[in-house]
Image (cartoon, rainbow, N blue to C red):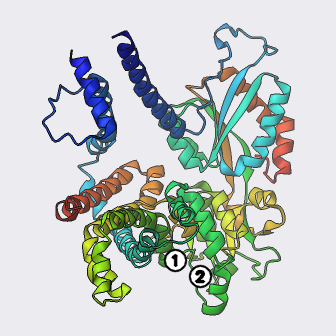
Amino acid sequence: MKTRSARRTRRMVQVAGAGAAALLALSACSSSSDSSSSPKSDSSSSSSSSAEKLSGTVTVFAAASLKESFTTLGQEFEKQHPGTKVTFNFGGSDTLAASITGGAPADVFAAASPKTMAIVTDKQDAAGTPATFVRNQLEIATLPGNPDKVASLKDLTKSGLKVVLCDKTVPCGAAAQKALEASNLKLTPVSYEQDVKSALTKVELKEADAAVVYKTDVKAAGDKVEGVEFPESAKAVNDYPIVLLKDAPNAEAAKAFIALVQSAEGSKVLTEAGFLQP
Amino acid sequence: MTGADTSRAAADTLTGGPRSGRVRRPGVPLPLMLPALVGLAFLLLPLVALLARAPWRTLPDQLTSTAVWQALQLSLVSATAATAVSLVLGVPLAWLLARTEFPGRGLVRALVTLPLVLPPVVGGVALLLALGRNGIVGQWLDAWFGITLPFTTAGVVVAEAFVAMPFLVISVEGTLRAADPRYEEAATTLGASRFTAFRRVTLPLIAPGVAAGSVLAWARALGEFGATITFAGNFPGRTQTMPLAVYLALQNDPAAAIALSLVLLAVSITVLAGLRDRWMTAS
């Protein structure tokens, strides 16, 4: 009788275990930055002293175009504050904004446009007012060597040329639309991509002949694409706002990260990546 | 004493003895009942939430927009085409796997099922590298026939067929294995060629399995997102299927996304319910 009940208990435990494993797997899927389980910084005891030791994980949701420069800054931050860890979630600003208002645990949000930032501030999910830290200008990315001889925005409207744009809901797509409208051009792309990196990838893989992306993306892609500047891009420069989030699990370290982004050192990294100062 | 009864019953089940007699069924055990109910609720709750939060008041406006119909039409056409492709290529493949002996058959079967477990986005990237304008095969398609698949509706069909065909192959192969090969053997001894036997004997025999496989493949193709957006891109009316429209609408207009999701849900339920009575219970 004893062994039987023991066996039954074990079976129940197995069932429960399997269920728990399934739930774990699910929650791991639901948000890509669920690593905030590490100890929080003791923000309760933070009175003043900026020399206070920071710890724990800072979760930063940032526009896809910030990938290279923010990754560098994250490593710099971890070096300056041993014991901290910066995890990033890079994506389309609108997707990130939607997941923040949907309750994703994040400390910092850096968007590629004030409009996508407004989604978060309108829902009162931000602590304080967003600050513009860089600006980004559009550029045409063509195949290496520019075989189609693209020299202007107008050249993209040539028939037979496969052009990809960002979707209008994404900042880079909205900016491209603005530039096209400002110069009275009508461009029919082959695809509206969901974020700037996937637009660039289509050119890198040579599936598209050209894409309208950010200067910074062209720079980050190295010699896999060739950049073509166009004057109309001045009419559609994107401001990048950054803000501390209201429900930030690690507000102290998050503030320090934002300070690093806005510091001289931060702007050096960002300028090197091709961003413009505000 | 019920404990002893159940353990004896369990032992009998394990030995696989044919117990035609009526087994006294005790009530459903709690360790099974509880997770089963939780599982059921877990599967149904999101659908209930979708219905509860649906913008019923603005729904007529949302659904009569041309963008929705364009996406729905494209989804239905491309899913049906992908199912047709899967049928033409998948049924012979299933027959090959079930009825012939060749070295490495187990490996081939494993490879066929690979798209089932592969993340669809990875499938999309793989398709780009194979059939893209610069891909291994795609560059020849472009050079010889002037065919480029990415960013076209044909590309959507290719992406959907890639992820949906394994469902059909597995389903049909299973049915073929269950079907008695002696019918075919009888047909061939009576003078039919092997192909005639397949066409006149095997195919009618496995029709329910083919139908069930087609429905599965069609449903999978209808919901395809990752491979499609990666391989075929996103352009309204050409490659923007319903799942893509839902995803992009979710970013700036959640109400529209919910409306689109409801349409997709209704279509899926209608098709599954309609076909279930006719074919799926027959198998």
> Residue at image x 42%, y 51%?
B253
In the rendered structure, the answer to whether residue A39 lies left or right of residue B255 reads right
Give the x, y percent position of residue B52. 26, 41
Task: Assign a secondary structure to mark 2.
Answer: loop
Pick the residue in front: B91 or A47: B91
Dot 1 corresponds to which residue? B152
Give the x, y percent position of residue A143. 76, 74
> Residue at image x 27%, y 87%?
B190
Question: Which quadrant would residue A73 be assigned to in this image?
Answer: top right
Report the amino acid beneath label 2: Thr
Same chain letter for marks 2 and 1: yes
Report the amino acid beneath label 1: Thr
The chain holding disc 2 is B
Q: Quadrant of the N terminus of chain A?
A: top left
Q: Residues within 10 Å of mark 2 (few under 14, many from 20)?
A: many
> Residue at image x 64%, y 92%?
B144
The residues tagged by marks 2 and 1 sit, at their Cα atoms, a distance apart of 8 Å
Task: Assign a secondary structure to mark 1.
Answer: loop
Label pair 2/1, CB-CB below 8 angstroms: yes
For the question of whether residue A94 can be seen, the reply is: yes
Give the x, y percent position of residue A20. 46, 28
The chain holding disc 1 is B
Q: Residues within 10 Å of mark 1 (few under 14, many from 20)?
A: some
In the rendered structure, the answer to whether residue A170 lies left or right of residue B212 reads right
Question: Which quadrant would residue A226 be assigned to in this image?
Answer: bottom right
> Residue at image x 40%, y 61%?
B220
Give the x, y percent position of residue B237. 43, 73
Instruction: Using the image, determine if residue A101 lies above or below residue B149.
Output: above
Instruction: Using the image, determine if residue B210 lies above or below residue B41.
Output: below
Pick the residue in front: A202 or B27: B27
Question: Which quadrant would residue A158 be assigned to in this image?
Answer: bottom right
Dot 2 corresponds to which residue? B148
